[in-house]
Amino acid sequence: MLFRSVCRAVHQHARQPAKQFRRGSGTLVVRSHDWEETMITAKTRLLQSTACAGILLFGLSGTALAEKIEFYPISTDPNDWVVDRYPTASFTRLDTYMGRSNVLALETLGSKAGSNSYYQWEGYSQNTTVPSGDSFIGGDIYVADGWQAGSDTDYIRTSIWGSAMTEKEVATGNYNNNDAVFPIIQFTNRDGQGRLEVWDAGTDNGWVELPETTGLINFSGWNTIDMRLMTDVDEEGNSAVHYYFNNALIYVWEPALSLDDTSPEQFFAMYLKNRNNGVTDFTSHWSRLLSGLLLPEDVNEIGNAPYDVLVANNDAPVTVGAGATIGGTLTSKGTSAYNQVIALQPGAKISDDLILQHSTGNFMSGAGDTATVGGDLYVENGSSTTGGTIENKVNVNGRMFVDDTSKAGGNLNIAGSANSSGRLAPGNSIGTITVGGDLNLASTSVIEAEVDLAGKSDLIAVGGVANLAGAVEVDTIDGYLLDHGYVILTASGGVNGEFASSIPVWDNVDNYAFVAPYLSYDPNSVILTVGRNDRRFASVAETPNQVAVANALETLGDLSPPPTLYENIILKMTADDAPLAYSALSGAIYASGQTVMIDQTQYARDAVYGRLHQAFGGKSTSSVEVMSYAEGRDDMVGGRLIEESAFGAWGYAYGGWSAYDGNANAGKLDSSTGGFLAGIDGSIGDRWRLGVLAGYGYTSFDNKGPASGNTDSYTIGAYSGGEWAAGTAGAVAFRSGMAYTWNTVSADRTVSFPGFYDAMSSDYDAGSFQVFGELAYRYAADENTEVEPYANFSYVGLNSDSFTETGTTAAALSVASESSNTYFSTIGLWAAADFAVMGQAGSEAYFDVGWRHAFGDITPKSTAAFAGSAPFTVSGVPLAENTALIGAGIDFALSQQAKLGFGYIGQFGDGVSQNSINARLNVSF
């Protein structure tokens, strides 16, 4: 794996487009003077040189990490190298060496060579296993111009280079076997001209001089050398090693063509070689010696390091420890797919620059202590910063540069200028960025300004001139003050220019619908004000009810001062939230409650129709329970017996459940009811009966949401009816009645939407009056079966009182009195048959089917007002206009004077369904 010239790249901040190559399982990126390559994601350890101080922290594991990284220098003083043997030693980790613990050192291995060599006692362990696939090793070397010129017969060989071995030869310790050592590059100087020479143990001649490389050598400067192990270079799957010098391919080693045809699959070990044939007056320094899969295991924290540090492509966050000092520049490099996280603990210090690329820089604050950047801060390639406090800002002693893909956030103190093409976001939440020099904003820049309900806001405080461009985005924390001037930027040297728009955009997920932020300028500051825009409340309403509520709320703005409901609630609505708020505020439950009370009047009508139906000796109906005690008289109507009693008493118990689907204007409504009606009647003349009734019912209803109500209903009424023979097998029947019901209503509703909550309750009265009549023709099909076509008509008038809700906010409504007039017409067919139970005749089964039409005020209305607003009218859940009726039941004859019956009634209309059951008892006297 290749890493080249990191320290020079970091110091010079090269910004050239990347040159990328890919081989096998990874990709490698390294920045140098004027080029960049993509780094392979791998595990890397590092070696340091004081000639070009730097640290590479590359490819950290994603597992839990705890131990700090350790750095080991390579000496640049030749006196620190020991003349001993050739080849030189491999790098091996020693637990204890020469009285020093935990030292990485060179271990002397192999046989003595014929010429002297230098090797270092202190070094770096690099034994590794590179899995199948291409990998690289490389480094930088400084070549001095003081090489002594040689002659044709006596020339200088001097080399300082890391080579590699296969796993097999490391295991055997054989460093002289042809399969053991990869070829080595060295410098030569013949006739005053430097050349490169390769020693290949697998060839007959060993040394191969490369005469065309004279122009490649950079004297008195740095040169890059790297080896690239390429696997599967031919159809047989053989490997080759390409040797590059200053980015030029100078030699290709193909092991399969050497004396030993073993084709290595990996770099396994490296060693550092220094060779000199008789002359020691030279200077050569390594800047980097790396292998592609060398990793400091369990490392995620950097302590004190007197070098440049590069953190790249790590799978886990890396921390600069509390109080630690990085002696050079810290560079953090992620990728577009992975954002590298670098965290600076309290008191951490970077002596030079901090460069963030595809990275997040977290500045952590402690008690009175924060991080310091000694040089410039670069936020690039989708990076961001956070941290610091208003009291303990992150100190940047140089300048700050933010590109158009990145964001600088947190509480920062920039000593120099700040230059941004991206986003500046002071604090988190309210915070400050202080700039000692000028602020220079590009057209792509954005200022993110947060404001709160206490009147505070983010601030960029500039010591020089603020050169404005770009845009402003506004976000709220817990709200905002209407018409309050928030100062978001000050500039001691003056404000130059303006932002692109005087109306910033909201940075909230959903923008406020009815207010807008506005910018204004004075010579030394920029002021942000949030005020009412020209958008009407009703413009975002989605239903007629919502429009009505919105228009009423709009009138609250005419009050001075506007009430809380207007200023602090409605003016904080988004376009999505406002319709929901309108519905919650509407009080439509009071209109829907009228539908329930009108529908409940049917139980009294059913009871009366059933009683009169049975009182004249007919079969049971779908809705009556009769008791009668009296002497009867027998007449024949159409050949059938009519039993009329002088007096009768009846009772009717019922329970029912209704579901209203509602519509786009009014939501769903459910109700349930239960009650009891009783009556007594007697004969008037030969063919008429007159009676009275009374009853009690309880009904509850809710709108599948935050509103519900209940009624206690008390009913009194009177009824009459008569029958006349018509033909030999039938009779004409007329039935009628009237009733009045007192309804005591209690309702509760909760108003809840973003930023607001209140619970309201109310108690009020409502009364319903009804009159009804039915005309039927009863026909005896045979002695056991009877059918009856019928038609009826009814009127229901409902009046409700005015009232005011109790609540804690202006959302409480004052509701006006209401009245409505509704009409129902029904046609149907009823049929019954006699049967005997245990020898007792007179039991009956019946079936009823019909169609009902409602007209008049079938959509209830409710008019209300907020405190100080204009009144508004909303609609509730409508009555079903057309309904199918189905009834069935059975009556058992307990004796000649008593019957007990049970029945079912179903009503099904467009969006409405009602199901009820009843029980009846009849005794005559």
Image (spheres, rainbow, N blue to C red):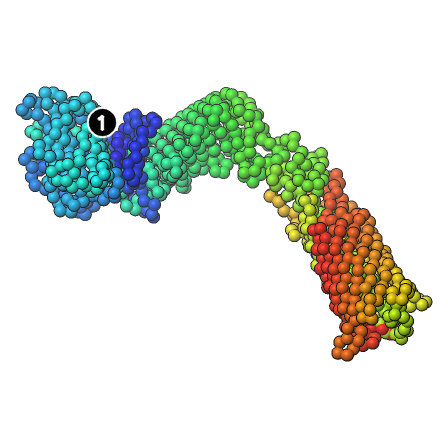
Residue placed most toward the observer, 403 or 845 = 845
Q: Residues within 10 Å of mark 1 (few under 14, many from 20)?
A: few
Residue 120, x across and y down, in percent:
15, 37
Q: Is residue 285 visible?
A: no
The part of the image, by quadrant, that contains residue 310 is: top left
**Residue at the spot x=91%, y=68% of the render?**
683
- Is 748 placed left or right of 679 in the picture? left
Name the residue: 88% across, 62% down: 732
Residue at horizontal 83 percent and vertical 57 percent from the top: 791
Residue ID at (63%, 40%):
578
Is residue 293 among what the camera can see?
yes
Callout 1: SS: strand
**Left-right relation of 697 to 537:** right
Residue 184 horizontal/vertical position (percent): 15, 34
Quadrant of the image containing the N terminus = top left
In this view, which residue lies farthest toward the right? Answer: 685
Which amino acid, by three-letter code, is at mark 1?
Ala
Does residue 58 sit above or below 604 in this rendering? above
472 or 347, nearer to the observer: 472
| Residue lying furthest bottom | 839
Q: Is residue 346 left or right of residue 277?
A: right
Which quadrant: the C terminus? bottom right
Circle 1 residue = 248
Q: Quadrant of residue 148 in the image?
A: top left
Rendering coords of residue 98 (x, y %)? 14, 44
* Residue 566, quarter of picture: top right
